[in-house]
Structure formats: structure tokens, C-alpha cells
Image (cartoon, coloured by chain):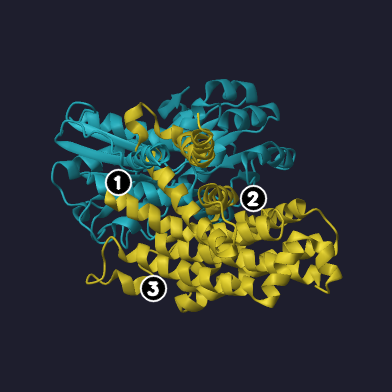
Amino acid sequence: MSKTTLVKNTLKTLLLSLLLTTPLPAESPPKKIAITQYVEHVSADAVRRGLIEELARKGFKEGKNLTIVFENAQGNAGTAGQIARKFIGLNPDVIVGITTPSAQAIVKAVGQGSLPIVFSAVTDPIKAGLVSSLTHPQGNVTGVTDAPPIKEQIAFLKNLLPKAHTIGVLYNPGDSGSASSLEAIRKEAERQSLKLIEATPFKSSDIQAAILQLVGKVDAIYVPLDNMIVSAMGSVSALALKHDLPLFVADSGSVEAGALACLGYSYSQTGHKTGQIVSEILRGKNPSEIPVASPGRTDIFINQDALEKLGLSLPEAVRAQAHFY
Amino acid sequence: MNLIQFMGAVELGLLYGLVAMGVWLSFRILDFPDLTVDGSFPLGAAVCAILIVSGVDPWVATFCAILAGMLAGLTTAWISVRWNILHLLASILTMTALYSINLRIMGRPNIALLGEKTIFSALEDPALRSLFTMPFAMFILSGVVLVLLYRFLMSEKGLAIRATGANSRMAKAQGVAVNRRILFGISLSNGLVALAGALFAQSQGFADVTMGVGTIIVGLAAVIVGEAIFNPRIILTALIACVFGSIFYRLAIAMALNAGFLGLQASDLQLVTAVIVGIAMVTPKLRAKILDFASSGR
């Protein structure tokens, strides 16, 4: 009996201790924030980096007077809910939810509590059910929306390519960001008398076929704020260039990855804005007093290499204010 | 792991226990590897969410979600049985189509149910709201489903389904309408998964078209972990093993989320989860070996 029970008990204790293990608490620093995002994406990663940089600029340095807990749901909705529960248990000063599903999971788990929640990179926070008003968010939730300035972007495209009459829109129909800007894109294109052709890859392996489908039919390609397409920007831009198609993007970071031009915000700018809001809350402001923000003023970004290869020239007014890569 | 996290894992584990029972029914009982569940989980969520935001009673919406899931399962089984197409391929077809269908149903990739009336709304009353309310509600729900499913499998019809999966030739010889049993069994399996999707959307506050990714893996892992721990020989234990396997799987993820002190990064989550589940599956075998060794007298 002794031997078997001993083995049994040892195993039981082992399993139990595994279950009950908690990480060692750090030496109680003054502030703690918890960040989560839904998937690994260059865009969401850029938001997070921008956020941490901005906090450091505002005097909250990680490791010094700020602890940052970060979790990634790796694309699993159930895990997103579990991360939210973990964060609540940690009782941080602010929880940051980057991307729509992560923000929703946190808002649902926290409920009407007093824990401040800041969302980021959410294109339509009202439709996502996060806040009821952008100017007066009620309760404990506020954040940054990254809804791109569609009207200006389409006008910018026409300004650079006055002869264009058909543009291809490349987006993933499963991306909530793209989906919510698409209505505006359709309306704006019609108003500025542009014909639209939509190419809709469902997964990154379909992107190439989607671009090839546009070749010969369109004068330019436009990419909205779409996680999947932005992640694959290197190959998207190379393919567009190969077929002499000017590539316009809503995310400025994509210009560095080879896209021709962008008028808009960058994900890192979105992150910086988020950082400003988080630091205000850390300094004692109530989330309900902070209106939902947009990333700030728009800039023009041009990829010099793509510009030369396409043989295009810029209007003087654009050249004067553009940032070149 | 703190208590909030623990109870959250139990709640989700009970919810995904429905998925595990569905997967167990198709894989183990009917011997029909069915990947439709990756589509029927978000289908259940989509149907339920769109109906709720259109003002339909949440219970009715949940019921419609089950029907939609059953229809998806029926499609897979019909393609497979009627046209004699390999079950895996048939289910891949349905699963692929469901992605577009779910987008159509919702009209957008994400529907928020935050602040909408759901079947759990009554539990959000401050007097009732505690750490244990939601896990308890899930316990009741999955318990009811488990009992109903058990009673069904013990009935004559259920027995015919089990016979079909165990030995379809023999079942046919005994006068069982084999094809019809497969159609019904796979429908039932997907109905369970869609119910889980509907409950997920209501308890987590949103339906998202991408939320189905990996459902089959979660379900299978729960079934296998449950089997490794319980080594079930009768139907009732097998069903209970599904639910406990699912809870254990969620606890493994919760543990993996706390593994930061080992120098692991957020991106290591899936790996750590896999390792913990792996250990759980090997442990009972290891124990048997050790016991064997101990009782052999050496």
C-alpha cells in the first residue's frame, strides 16, 4: 500500500501545485497597466510600441515606475475572454484592449466596474458596443478610434492620378476595420466618380490571386486599414509594382513596406494617442471625462522608390508636405 | 492563478464542454471526423447575435442557432452519405462555405452584444452578480444538455446511432437505417456546437466571424484529455470526461497565461498550452507504468 499511495500522493501534490502556482509578485511599483491584443500583427504590434513609447515620454517608464503585463489571444476568442479574467484579477490601474474583439472581451468581463478600460485601433467603437457616445463616453471606457479619413484619401488619390477612373479595393471581408470603412469608400468613390472593383481575399494565401484579378482592370489599388493585408504589405506592394499599379494605403507604415502613397495616420501614431489617454488616467483622470480620440492630424507619406519605378511625378503642393521613404 | 481567472476558465470550460460532446459524438460514436464545427460554432454565434440585435427573444435566438447548426451538420452528412464523398472532405466543404455564409448572416464581421438582452441578462442583477454566478449558470446548462444527450444515447434511437458508428454493416443487417442515423447524429453534433457558439456570443458579448478558428482542435483536445484522465468505459463517464477534459484544457491555458515567470513571452502561449495538455495526457499512462513496476515486486 505504502508505495502506491506514495506515488499517487506525490502525483496528486504535483498536479495540485501546478494548478495553484501563481507568479511571484513584483516589488509593488506605483502603477500597473495590462495590455492585450487579439493576434500578432505588425499593425497591432506598432500600436503597442507607440503606446509604450508615449508612456515613457510622459514619465511612466517600464521597469521603473510602471509594470506592463501583456497577453496575446493568438486569434482565439475563448483565450481573449480568459485573458480579460486574468487582467481583472491583477487589478491594474488601466486595461488596454487593442483591436475590436479584445476590447469587447474586456468590456464584457469587467462590466460596470470601476476598472478603467482604454481601447485602441478600433474602427467603430459605437458599433462594437464599447461606448454609446464618442464625445461623452459613459462609465469606465474610452479610447482611440482609427477610422481613416476616407474622403481625403480618395481625393488624394485623384489628385495624384487625375486620369484614374477605376480603382481596386483590396480587403479581407472578415476584418471588422475594413468592413466598417467600406461603406464610406463606396459612397466616396461614387461621389468622386470613380468606379470600384473589390478584391476580397479571405486569408493571406489568397492575396496574390486577388491582386492578379485586378491587373488590367484598374488604374490603382487602395487598401483600407486591414490587419491581414497590412501584415502582407511587403509582398502586396512588390506584386502591385510588378504590374505597374500605384498602391494607395490607409496605414502610413505600409509606405515604408513598399506601398506608393498614403494620406493618413500610422498605427504607431494611434499608439501614441492611446498612450496620452492612458497617462491621463494614470494621473487620476476619469475615463468618462476623456472623449474618444482619433490619432490626430493626417500626414502624407510617399515611397520614393515606387514613385520612380512607376514613372509618376508629384504635384508641387504634395511634394512640399510629403514625408519620403 | 487568481480566483477570477480560475472561475473564468471553469465557465469557458463548461461552455466548450458542449463542443467537446459534439466532437465526441461525431469522432468517437459515429466514427465520422467532422470539421464542420469550425464553421458551426461561429454560425451559432452569428444567428443568435443577429436575431438578438433585431429584437428577438434571446431564448428563441438561441434555439434558432441550434437549428442552424443542425442544418450545417445535415449538409455535411448529406454530401458525404448521398454522394459518397469522404467525410473529411464533405466537412471541409461545409466549413469553408460557412465562413461566407456567416458573414452574410451577420452583414458585418463583428456584432456586439454588449448591453443587449441575453439569456444571461437576469444574472447581471447586482444582487446576483458574483464570481460564481456565470460558472454556475454554465454548469446547469451543460448539465442539462449532458443528461438529455445521455438519455438519448441510451434510447433505442441512440443505440442505433451507436451501432452505426461501431459497425455499420452489422447495424444495417439488424435493420438500422444507417444513413439516416448518420444524418441525424452529425446534425445533433453540430447543433451542440452551434449552441456553444450562441452561448459564447451571449456570455462574452460579441460574435466575430473569425471566432471559429481552431474550434475542432479545442474540442478534440478536450475529448482526448478527458479520455486520458477518466479512461471511460460507459457512455455516462465518456460524456462527463468530455466536460472535464474541456475544463482542464481551459485551466491549461490559464496556467500558460501565468507562465511569464519562467521567462516565457506572450507569443509562447500556444506552445505552453500544448505542453501542459501533453503532460496531462501522458501522466495517467506514466502512473500505470509506475504502478505496474511497483506491483511487480521490484
Considering only vertical position in the picture, is B180 above or below B94? below
Return the x and y of residue A49 as percentages of the image width and height: 35, 31
Q: In this image, A91 relative to A304: left or right? A: left
Mark 2 belongs to which amino acid?
Leu
Chain assignment, label 3: B
In three-dimensional space, the C-alpha distance between marks 1 and 3, rounded to whole angstroms, equals: 26 Å
Which element type, helix, strand or loop, lies under badge 3? loop
Mark 1 belongs to which amino acid?
Phe
Which element type, helix, strand or loop, lies under badge 1? helix
- Identify the residue under disc 2: A196
Chain assignment, label 2: A
In three-dimensional space, the C-alpha distance between marks 1 and 2, rounded to whole angstroms, equals: 44 Å
Specify the colour of chain A.
Answer: cyan
Return the x and y of residue A141 as percentages of the image width and height: 27, 54
Return the x and y of residue B243 as percentages of the image width and height: 49, 58
- Identify the residue under disc 3: B117
Return the x and y of residue A195 as percentages of the image width and height: 65, 51
- Identify the residue under disc 1: A87
